[in-house]
Structure formats: structure tokens, C-alpha cells
Image (cartoon, rainbow, N blue to C red):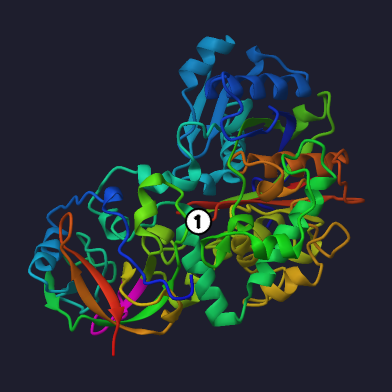
Amino acid sequence: MTDLLAKRPPRAFFTLSTDAWTKPFWDAAAEHRLVAPRCVDCGHFRLPPTPFCPQCRSQKIDWVTLSGRGTVYSYTVVARAVLPDMEANLPYVPAIVELEGAGGARLISNVVDVPVEAVRVGSAVRVVWDDEGGPTVPRFTLAD
Amino acid sequence: MRHAMRDRTAIVGVGSTPYYKRGQSAPQTLHELVGKSILAALDDAGLGVADVDGFAYFAGGFDTGLLMETLGIPEVRFTASLTGTGGGSAGAVGLAAAAILSGQAETVVVVGGNQQGAQRFGTITSSYEATPDNAFFAASGLVGPGHMFALLARRHMHLYGTTRDHFADVALTMRRHALGNPEALMKKPLTREDYHAAPLLADPHCLFDFCLESDGAIAVIVTRAERARDLRRKPVLVRACTQGASRDWGRSIYWMNMPDESFASSGHAPVARRLYEQADVTPADIDVAQIYDHFTSQVIMQLEDYGFCAKGEGGPFVSSGAIALDGSIPVNTDGGQLSCGYVWGMTHIREAVEQIRGSAVNQVSGAELALVTGGPSVVPVSGLILSS
């Protein structure tokens, strides 16, 4: 699998569900803006968005537009289909991305469009928007 | 001060169905497998269905009413479950002990079972309902726990230099233990070459880093220690049992925002610390350990969190031979979930009971203290120490 390009994971496993606290994230994604919630009162970032700040219990949020850059905190390479729907999308690379400017908050996403062998813990990445076949989802690719 | 739970309850019976490869238990139903394990455990204890007055479950448990209806259990005074998933398996024994020591029940069944013909646990995450919280991992194609724990394993490799050969040593050791256990599903030796030739299902995890997908049910009977002495089998005392997790761990594999110091862990460190305090023992006092082995990498991280080696040194520790039958801390002496059978952690309780009774197939000579872990998954994870 040395020179295989990392694909996007199958859409079949993802149905977007939102609530009042998470909807702004996905609405921004539809506009190709990567945002994260910052507590108005103490400045703590949290992902996923939740009704209370775990640091100070405040319910006030600022939605901060981020640079879209980040760092791969960890990743895995999925190269075998454990469900039939996965076959056409292999290999894909689920990755945890520490988002720049978000106080260490991480997003579970994917690294795409680069050789799977090129992905490392610590790789610099930038967001790319995946609009195909469903609601817009942030993915990441290696930054130049 | 002596902890209120220490040695005041005991496991007096254990019952198990055979272990079946995924789907092979049909046409028996899961309810039937659970019923068979309960009847076998009662028979082992020399008790009958009329003695049962409580159920303590984990992962949501089973339908107590249906069990009463089908087994003819006259009356139940306590029926409760730990929250979460497999992390509560060891902790369910503590739930039973709590019911007994608070006078709410006298004879409590702890039972777990799974039948994976319809829904494989390997892809269970993909079956979860779409929720606002799940949306933050579901889009990434993490369809099973193996994919999620691979992310923790990769981070452990990055931080501490852990290698796939360390993971291999867990898999190879469990297989050697299984070869001595006639009930184990895996019957053939596993070599390092076999390990490295296996497909990477979720790099760095290959096929042999994943536990088996099997069917079966196991029940144990818990009662007061004084009463246990009058029953058929040698009592296996509940020395200590703890459950829970820190906020840092919480939703863990579905959250992935754990602080760096706890990300590459099993989440068990606080539960382990309280367990040893309750039991008034240290890791060096444990004679045999049944460590929840859904993934080889998580055996390594639990050995660290339970203090058998320092943080980050779990890889070299398992490769030193320490977890073999003749090692300093024999681990998963029945072959574990990796090579014997997967019954959501209940196999570990069963094997610890056998070790303390002195009747295990791979008996550790003079075993007096046995550790059992449940989890690592979302809160709660749990730990149990059984004693002779």
C-alpha cells in the first residue's frame, strides 16, 4: 500500500445530527469555515461543542473562525473492509487533528489526498472541504 | 482503616457456556445462553433458582423479568446495572457486593454474554444511533473500537517508542496460554512471522491485535462471606472492587480530547490506585492478572496503569517474558479474549475464580490474589481483586 493515496471514508456510516450547541459548527462548515467554540467567560475551547464550559460552567460561547491549519496528534490507516460499504474507499486515514488557535482542542477527522505513508504524528495539515454525497465535512491534507 | 467491602462477600459459583466462534451458537438465543450460564453457576454453588434474589449487571444488562419468567425465579429484591459498556465487567461484582453489604440482597447473579451473529462488535460503532455528539467521530470512518484504540496505540508508540513487536509479544503469549486450555477457541500456535504477515486492520493494529469475536455467556454467584463458607465450593473472596474514571478519560475514544498524559493510557490509573488502597496491597502482591484484552496495545497500557511497570515501559515489559506463566505477573492464563474467547470481560472473572480455587488449567502455583480488569472504554472502567 506504499504509494496509495488516502481516500475519503465512506459516507454510508455518517448521518448528520445536530442540536442547538453543535449546529453552528456544521453551518459554518457548509460555508467552508472551520470554527470552534470558545468560552466567553474563561476563554476555554471545547470540542465537540457542549452546553456548558467544563472549566467554569458558563453557557456563553464565541464561535471563533480558525486558520484551518493544525497538527496530526495521532492517526490510523484503515486498509481492510470490515463492512462491505468500505471497500471502494480504502485506504483511508482517520486522524486526530490539534487545531491551530483553538487552545489545544482536537477534531476527529481524516487526512486525505496524500500517500498514506507520508502521514506522521506531528505532520502539519490544512483543512479541505468535502461536499460530496452529504453535508459538508472538514477533512485535512498535508500542508506545504 | 479496613475498607467496608474487603473480604465480606464471595463468589461461590461460576457457570459458563462453551465458547463459540461468532454466530456458531445458533440456534440457541442469547437469552438461552445467559440462562444456561446462570443455571450452571447455581449448580456449581449448590444453590437453586429460589436462592437468587438479585441481579447485578454491566453495560445495561439483560431483561431481569424475562430471566425470572423463564428460569422460575420467585422474587428479586435488587436489579441494577453499571452504565457504560465492557468497562464495567469487573465492577459488576462490586455492584453485587454493594447490594449484599447494604442488606438489599443476599444472593446476587452477575452475568454477561454476547452473540455476534447479527451485530459484530468489530463494527459496533457503525450501528450507533446518529446523535449530535457522535457526528464528531462518525464522519471520519471510525466504524469499530479497533479503529479508535489504534489511535491511542499510535500515540503510545510516538511518545514511548513502543513497537509492533511489543504488541506481538502480547498476542503470542496469550496464544501460548490458550494452547494449554482445551476450552480455548484458538488451537494452533502463533509465530512472530504469522503476526507480521497478518493484515493491518487498523494500522498499527493487525488481525492478531484484535480480540476474538465469539459467542457465549458466563455467570457468577455472589453472596455474604459467612454464608459462603457453608456452601459447596471454596469461597473466592471479593477483596476489593472499584470503578469509574477521571474527567480526563470520560467519553475517551468517542471524545479524543484527553490530555496528553492520559491519552495514551487505558484510563484505569485512578481506578487502580483506589483498588490497591481498598485492598491494602501493592502490585507486587498480585499473583495473577486477568487483563481485559480487546486489543494487545491496551494490555500494555493497563499493565502501566496498574503499576506493574512504569508509564511508557509496558512494551519492553511484555517482551521481557514478565506476563508469561512463569513470569513475574502471569497475565490471562486462559488465553484471554485474544485467543480463548470473548464474553465481554466475563472470561477474566471466570479465570480469576479458577486461579484462586486452584483449579485453573494453567494454574499459577499458590495464587492467593488475582486481579481482574474491565474496560478500557468509556467511563466506567473497573478493577477487581479476588483473594483466597
Chain on which label 1 sits: B
| Image quadrant where residue B74 sits | top right
Q: Amino acid at mark 1?
A: Gly
Tag 1 secondary structure: helix
Relative image position of residue A106 (x, y in whole percent): 32, 73
Q: Measuring 80% from the left and 58% from the top, which residue is drawn there?
A: B330
Q: Is residue A135 visible?
A: yes
Above or below B162: residue A80: above
Q: Measuring 85% from the left and 39% from the top, which residue is drawn there?
A: B357
Number of numbered labels in the structure image: 1
Q: Measuring 68% from the left and 18% from the top, which residue is drawn there?
A: B39
Q: Which residue is mark 1?
A: B146
Above or below B223: residue B313: below
- Side of A8 relative to A119 (left or right): left
- Quadrant that contains the C terminus of chain A: bottom left
Which residue is situated farthest in the right direction here? B365
Q: Is residue B251 visible?
A: no
Relative image position of residue B308 (x, y in whole percent): 72, 68
Above or below B27: residue B74: above
- Side of B25 relative to B386 (left or right): left
- Side of B244 relative to B39 (left or right): left
The answer to which of B326 and B180 lies nearer the viewer is: B180
Relative image position of residue A33 (x, y in whole percent): 12, 74
Relative image position of residue B175 (x, y in whole percent): 76, 52
- Residue stretch rendered in magenta on the structure: A96-106
Residue B235: say if magenta: no
Mark 1 Cα within 10 Å, few/some/many (few <14, many 20+)?
A: many
The answer to which of B184 and B331 lies nearer the viewer is: B184
